[in-house]
Image (cartoon, rainbow, N blue to C red):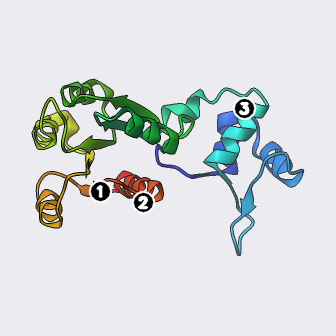
Amino acid sequence: MHDKKGFTTGEVAELCHVTIPTVIKWIESNELEGFKIPGSKNRRITRENLIKFMKKHNIPIDQLQKNRPKILAVDDEEIILEVFQGIFDEDSYDIRCVSRGFDAGLAKEFKPDVIILDICLPDIDGNTVCEYVRNMPEMKNVRILGISGNITKKELNDLKKRNFDDILAKPFDNDLLFAKVEKLLRK
């Protein structure tokens, strides 16, 4: 359920500790924004709208936060880490940012779903970090997105053939970064 974008009325009822008819009433009275699936009576509520509703009504969102995708971002540029935190909001993602490749060892305890890894780090080569993570049995399912500002097209293609699941050149478009991470979360 960690990559869930839409919830059924039954799931919302369970999360809010109410009945399904109560959730339907909330939707019909426009208290909770939802939508009907075309050609069906079934309704869905987006994660964003559910969080907004739960916060407004002081309903604990801890169950939703348990299921957030985990992202570990490793980059030596503080401004880039701030961009990552802005793109992946804390209500929908559990994101940890570190500025040294050595700190990527946090992956073992944090168990991220995706690692965004700067390939050119001052303390250790991103390729080395990637290999280290890939050699951890408990990290076999993690997806790694390599990013770099100093990369040629040939190097980009070589990196894709290595241990990285995808590569993105700096400067990057925020929407493209978001789309690539979302795609990796679905793999």
Which residue is more in the foreground, 79 or 16? Answer: 79
Q: Earlier in the sequence, mark 3 or mark 1?
A: 3
Q: Residues within 10 Å of mark 2 (few under 14, many from 20)?
A: few
Task: Quote the CA–CA distance across marks 1 and 2.
Answer: 9 Å
Who comes first in sequence, dot 3 or dot 2?
3
Describe the element under mark 3 as helix, strand or loop.
Answer: helix
- Give residue 58's position: percent from left, percent from top: 75, 26
In the depicted structure, whether residue 125 falls above or below residue 108: below
Say which amino acid is labelled 3: Lys
> Where is residue 173, by image quadrant?
bottom left
Q: Residue 29: horizontal and vertical position, in percent?
A: 90, 50
Q: Is residue 6 above or below residue 121?
A: below
User: How dense is the environment of label 3, judged by Cα within 10 Å: few (below 14), some, or many (20 and up)?
Assistant: few
Question: For mark 3, what is the residue?
Answer: 55
Identity of the residue drawn at 25% across and 47% down: 144
For the residues labelled 3 and 1, the Cα–Cα distance comes to 35 Å
Q: Secondary structure at mark 1?
A: strand
Disc 2: which residue: 176
User: Closest to the observer: 176 or 76?
Assistant: 76
**1 and 2 marks in contact (CB < 8 Å):** yes
Residue, disc 1: 168
Q: Are marks 3 and 1 in contact (CB under 8 Å)?
A: no
Question: Which quadrant would residue 152 be assigned to in this image?
Answer: bottom left
The quarter in which the C terminus is drawn is bottom left
